[in-house]
Amino acid sequence: MEWLVGNVLTVDLPPASFDLWHDRAVFHFFMSPEDRHRYIAQVSRVLRPGGLVVIVTFAENGPVRCSGLETMRYSASELLAELGADFRFLESRRDGHVTPGGGAGLHGVRVFV
């Protein structure tokens, strides 16, 4: 196993080098459309054909802040719209989660590329 450390928006990752992209709590902190587009472009570039993407974000009823930062909130269809046509929906699941500040409402979306 190799650990990589860097800003997900700018780190130089090898193209088509990952079978699985798992985002447990990053995407919902990108407030600007530009950052979301850069993130999605990075995922699209580094994922191998047939790879799996798991993105877990706050659901539309989730907290507007987490760990002192603003959050974006998504329904499954809103998140898929953000990801774009290169991603094929596989599954969506709501899971419980309580933030450090006591907020709740987590939404998991799994998609194929």
Image (cartoon, rainbow, N blue to C red):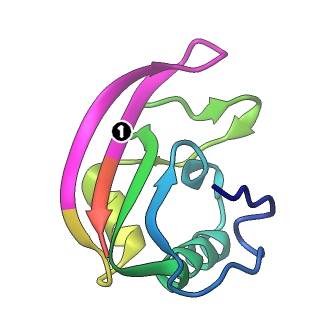
Horizontal side, residue 43 vs residue 7: left or right: left
- Between 45 and 9, the one nearer to me in the picture: 45
Q: State left or right for residue 88 relative to residue 78.
A: left
Q: Quadrant of residue 61?
A: top left
Amino acid tagged 1: His
Q: Give percent across and percent down for residue 69.
A: 73, 38
- Which residue of the protein is positioned furthest toward the left in this rendering? 90
Residue sitting at x 58%, y 20%: 99
Kindly identify the residue that appears in the image at 64 percent across and 32 percent down.
65
In the rendered image, the quadrant that contains the N terminus is bottom right
Q: Is residue 59 visible?
A: yes
Whether 104 is drawn above or below 113: the answer is above
Task: Specify start and end residues of the magenta stretch as a single range.
Answer: 90-108
The percent coordinates of residue 60 (x first, y second) are 38, 40
**Rendering coords of residue 59 (x, y %):** 38, 39
Q: Is residue 7 above or below residue 17?
A: above
Look at the image and say whether residue 91 sits in the magenta stretch: yes
Horizontally, is 91 left or right of 33 in the view? left
Is the residue 100 above or below the residue 84 in the image?
Answer: above
Residue 52 vertical position relative to residue 70 in the rendered view, above or below: below
Residue under circle 1?
Answer: 107
